[in-house]
């Protein structure tokens, strides 16, 4: 039975008493992390989803403060220098980061906090929160991953090429994480995440 362990690390005990729990969901772009996350949040409103900060431009329909906090590069770099991020990374030409203060506060108040982030950031979290539960989402095949990114219809050809090139490097890192889940049948993947979190 999978147990979600409380956070107890020397790096974090100063910031977080061992009350909350941190879950990291990672995997290549287009694998379905965001879609899985939305269903997970609908089914388990007690989860706290950390809204990331990014320098990427909003996609149609994306709302500042809900999907991301959209800021420019110089502001992002300023926040990095001020230590405002728990982790951050550059991905496909844009910066992405997890706000430190909000996440730490939520953990301290005993929440189950979920991050949906790319590989480099997930590695940073694993290093500073070794007891975090880390889940890697895999596609059923690389062709299906490309189909999903294209099917989403949100990225330029250049962005698609960058994301697919990065995906190859990311997929080989799957074994670094506590759990690997193939997102082929959506409902089965969702249930596998739920099992990891709650059973
Ligand atoms: N099990 C599935 N079967 C078929 N299509 C899926 C499945 N899961 C997600 N999708 C579709 O794949 C596309 C990409 O999903 P999504 O945007 O959630 O990926 P992502 O991993 O969050 O990508 P990114 O990291 O770039 O934000 C969406 O159109 C989504 O509807
Ligand atoms: N390291 C971080 N990665 C993040 C964060 N928020 C999102 N992401 C990941 O970036 C890519 C691209 O996202 P997209 O919305 O432009 O498609 C994807 O893998 C996200 O999971 C973050 O705070 N830190």
Image: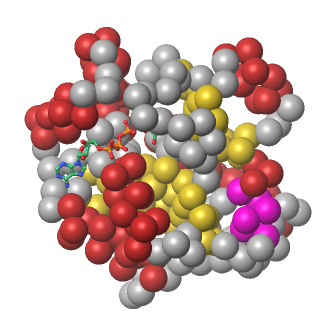
Residue sitting at the far top: 158
Residue depicted at x 36% and y 69%: 193
Region in magenta: 103-108
Horizontal and vertical percent for residue 82? 86, 32
Up-down: is 157 above or below 181? Answer: above
| Quadrant of the frame with the N terminus | bottom left
Q: Let me know if residue 147 appears in the view.
A: yes
User: On screen, 131 above or below 49?
Assistant: below
Residue 166: quarter of image: top left
x, y percentage for residue 92?
Answer: 44, 21
Q: Residue at x 76, y 59 (%)?
A: 104
Which sits in the foreground, 1 or 103?
103
User: Can you say which quadrant of the picture contains the C terminus?
Assistant: bottom left
Q: Judge from the rendering whether residue 83 lies leftward or rightward of residue 190; answer left or right.
A: right
Q: Main secondary structure of the magenta part?
A: helix
What residue is at 34 percent from the left and 58 percent from the top? 36
Q: Which image quarter: residue 155?
A: top left
Residue 191 percent coordinates (x, y) = 29, 74
Viewer-side residue, 79 vs 122: 79
Q: How is the image coloured?
A: secondary structure
Residue at 25%, 65% (x, y): give it: 189
Q: Determine the quadrant in which ligand 1 lies.
A: top left
Q: Nearer the viewer, residue 50 or 125?
A: 50
């Amino acid at each position: 039975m999978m147990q979600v362990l409380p956070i107890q690390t020397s790096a974090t005990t100063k910031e977080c008493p061992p009350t909350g729990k941190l879950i990291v969901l990672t995997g290549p772009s287009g694998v379905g992390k965001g879609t899985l996350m939305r269903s997970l949040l609908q089914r388990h409103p007690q989860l706290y989803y950390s809204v990331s900060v990014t320098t990427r431009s909003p996609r149609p329909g994306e709302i500042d403060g809900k999907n991301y906090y959209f800021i420019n590069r110089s502001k992002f770099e300023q926040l990095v220098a001020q230590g405002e991020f728990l982790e951050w990374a550059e991905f496909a030409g844009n910066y992405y980061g997890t706000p430190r203060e909000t996440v730490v506060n939520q953990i301290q108040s005993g929440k189950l906090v979920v991050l949906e982030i790319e590989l480099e950031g997930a590695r940073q979290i694993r290093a500073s929160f070794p007891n975090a539960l880390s889940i890697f989402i895999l596609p059923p095949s690389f062709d299906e991953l490309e189909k999903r990114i294209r099917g989403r219809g949100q990225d330029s050809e250049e962005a698609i090429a960058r994301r697919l090139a990065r995906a190859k490097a990311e997929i080989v890192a799957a074994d670094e994480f506590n759990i690997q889940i193939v997102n082929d049948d959506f409902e089965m993947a969702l249930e596998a995440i739920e099992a990891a979190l709650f059973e």
